[in-house]
Image: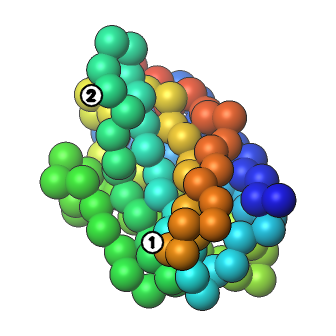
């Protein structure tokens, strides 16, 4: 069974940085898509960044140049490095793992990121 545990959220001032971690178990890194999503109050959940089969990387336009997704297969962990944070980045951030073959689609519990002075 695929399990995901996020960590690293918190309160940061505008312009600051945070690194989120998603510890993954049970997902095949050669055929999965790991995505970081976020949901702000009153808004729909949106994709922030994704890494597919360990090689293809996509970012939302709103975070390009500021956020970086990466994967450490030895640690079974996907990271989201967030720099130059803005108040609009405030949201609950979720990690998602999907099989490219449709075998699973699992979510973590989420971690709160608050950008405020």
Residue in front for this viewpoint, 37 or 79: 37
Residue at point 19% right, 47% down? Answer: 62
Q: Secondary structure at mark 2?
A: helix
Q: Reply above or below: 40 against 83.
A: above
Residue at point 82% right, 59% down? Answer: 1
The earlier-in-sequence mark between 2 and 1 is 1
Q: Give the colouring mode of the picture.
A: rainbow
Q: Secondary structure at mark 1?
A: strand
Q: Is residue 113 visible?
A: yes
Residue at point 37% right, 81% down? Answer: 56
Tell me where residue 66 appears, x and y as whole percent: 29, 56
**Mark 1 crowdedness (10 Å alpha carbons): few <14, some 14-19, many ≥20:** many
Residue in front for this viewpoint, 29 or 104: 104
Tell me where residue 21 appears, x and y as whole percent: 64, 54
Q: Which mark is residue 88?
A: 2
Residue in front for this viewpoint, 111 or 115: 111
Tell me where residue 9 appears, x and y as whole percent: 59, 36
């Amino acid at each position: 069974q695929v399990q995901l545990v996020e960590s690293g959220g918190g309160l940061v001032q505008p312009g600051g940085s945070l690194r989120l971690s998603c510890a993954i178990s049970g997902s095949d890194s050669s055929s999965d898509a790991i995505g970081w999503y976020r949901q702000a109050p009153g808004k729909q959940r949106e994709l922030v960044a994704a890494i597919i089969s360990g090689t293809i990387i996509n970012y939302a336009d709103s975070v390009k140049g500021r956020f970086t997704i990466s994967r450490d297969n030895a640690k079974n962990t996907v990271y989201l490095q967030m720099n130059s944070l803005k108040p609009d980045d405030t949201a609950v951030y979720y990690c998602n793992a999907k099989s490219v073959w449709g075998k699973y689609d699992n979510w973590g519990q989420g971690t709160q990121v608050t950008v405020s002075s």
